[in-house]
Image (spheres, rainbow, N blue to C red):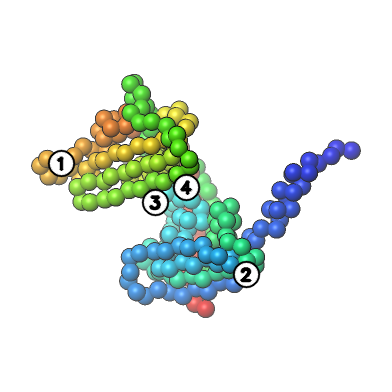
C-alpha cells in the first residue's frame, strides 16, 4: 500500500481548517465623499474596510491591475462601502486567507460572478539594455517595499528588495497596458527611477521610456501578446446591515 507523506496530510488538514468564508459581515454605504480607502486586517480575525468601491474590492480579491477586467457595472467605481467582517477563528487573517475570504464576501453580498479569459492585445515587454542593468541586487535582510510619489511633472519610484515581476506590474499600472517581464533577472533588487508623466512644459524631465533606459538600463518594447482578463458576468449592490 502506498504511504502518503505525513507532511502532505498535515498540510491538507491545515488547509481544511482555514476559514473560507466570514462568520459575520456588516456592509454600509459610505456617503462621505472622501477619496481615501483603508483596508485593515486586525487582531481577532477582523477585516475592516473603509470607503471602498466594488472596483477596489475586486482588485484586491483577485490581485488585478487597474485595467485587467471588463464587463464592470456603471456604479462600481462610484458607490463606496464600509465593511466589517470577522472569521470564526480569533487569529489574524493571513495573506493566504485574504483573497479567498474577500472573493467569498463578494459572492455572498454582491452576488458577484466572473470568469477568466486570455485575450490578445497590445502589451509591452520589459527587457535589459545591451549594457546590462544599472542597479544592484539587494543584499540586506528582507525589507521589501515599492513606493511611488507623484507631482504634476514628476513621478519618483523607489524599489527595495523587489523582483522584476513586481516592477513590471507597477509599470503596467502606470502605462495602462500589460507589461511582461523578460529581463531574465531572477533576483531581488534596489532601484530608483524618476520621469515626467506629461512632458508639456519647458525643462521637463525624461519620459518613462527614456528614464528606464538611462537610469536603470531597461527598455520597454511594444508587442502583441496575451493577457489574462477577469470578465465580470454579474454584480449587485449589497443591502445594508
Which residue position holds label 1?
204
Q: Is residue 157 above or below residue 231?
A: above
Q: Position of residue 83 (x, y in %)?
A: 49, 70
Q: Earlier in the sequence, mark 1 or mark 4?
A: 1
Q: Is residue 128 above or below residue 2?
A: above
Check disc 1 and report its element: helix, strand or loop: loop
Residue at 48 percent across and 63 percent down: it is: 40
Q: Position of residue 8 (x, y in %)?
A: 74, 44
Which residue position holds label 3?
66
Q: Position of residue 235 (x, y in %)?
A: 49, 64
Which of the two marks, 3 or 4, is nearer to us in this view?
A: 3
Check disc 3 and report its element: helix, strand or loop: loop
Q: CA distance from mark 2 to mark 4?
A: 30 Å
Q: Nearer the viewer, residue 177 or 95?
A: 95
Q: Earlier in the sequence, mark 2 or mark 1?
A: 2
Q: CA distance from mark 2 to mark 1?
A: 53 Å
Q: CA distance from mark 3 to mark 1?
A: 27 Å
Q: Earlier in the sequence, mark 3 or mark 4?
A: 3
Question: Is 46 positioned to the left or the right of 223 in the image?
Answer: right
Which of the two marks, 1 or 4, is nearer to us in this view?
A: 1
Q: Earlier in the sequence, mark 3 or mark 1?
A: 3
Question: Is 101 positioned to the left or the right of 213 in the image?
Answer: right
Q: Earlier in the sequence, mark 2 or mark 4?
A: 2
Amino acid at each position: 500500500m502506498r504511504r502518503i507523506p505525513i507532511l502532505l496530510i498535515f498540510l491538507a488538514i491545515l488547509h481544511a481548517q482555514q476559514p473560507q468564508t466570514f462568520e459575520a459581515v456588516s456592509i454600509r454605504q459610505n456617503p462621505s465623499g472622501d477619496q481615501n480607502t483603508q483596508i485593515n486586517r486586525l487582531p481577532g480575525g477582523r477585516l475592516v474596510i473603509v470607503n471602498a468601491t466594488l472596483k477596489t474590492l475586486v482588485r484586491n480579491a483577485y490581485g488585478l491591475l487597474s485595467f485587467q477586467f471588463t464587463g464592470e457595472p456603471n456604479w462600481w467605481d462610484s458607490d463606496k462601502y464600509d465593511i466589517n467582517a470577522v472569521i470564526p477563528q480569533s487569529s489574524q487573517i493571513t495573506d493566504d486567507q485574504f483573497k479567498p475570504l474577500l472573493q467569498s464576501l463578494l459572492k455572498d453580498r454582491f452576488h458577484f460572478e466572473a470568469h477568466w479569459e486570455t485575450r490578445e492585445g497590445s502589451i509591452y515587454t520589459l527587457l535589459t539594455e545591451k549594457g546590462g542593468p544599472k542597479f544592484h541586487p539587494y543584499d540586506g535582510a528582507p525589507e521589501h517595499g515599492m513606493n511611488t510619489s507623484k507631482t504634476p511633472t514628476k513621478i519618483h519610484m523607489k524599489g527595495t528588495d523587489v523582483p522584476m515581476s513586481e516592477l513590471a506590474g507597477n509599470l503596467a499600472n502606470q502605462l495602462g497596458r500589460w507589461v511582461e517581464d523578460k529581463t531574465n533577472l531572477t533576483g531581488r533588487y534596489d532601484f530608483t527611477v524618476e520621469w515626467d508623466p506629461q512632458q508639456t512644459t519647458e525643462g521637463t524631465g525624461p519620459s518613462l521610456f527614456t528614464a528606464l533606459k538611462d537610469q536603470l538600463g531597461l527598455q520597454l518594447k511594444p508587442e502583441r501578446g496575451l493577457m489574462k482578463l477577469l470578465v465580470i458576468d454579474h454584480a449587485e449592490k449589497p443591502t445594508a446591515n
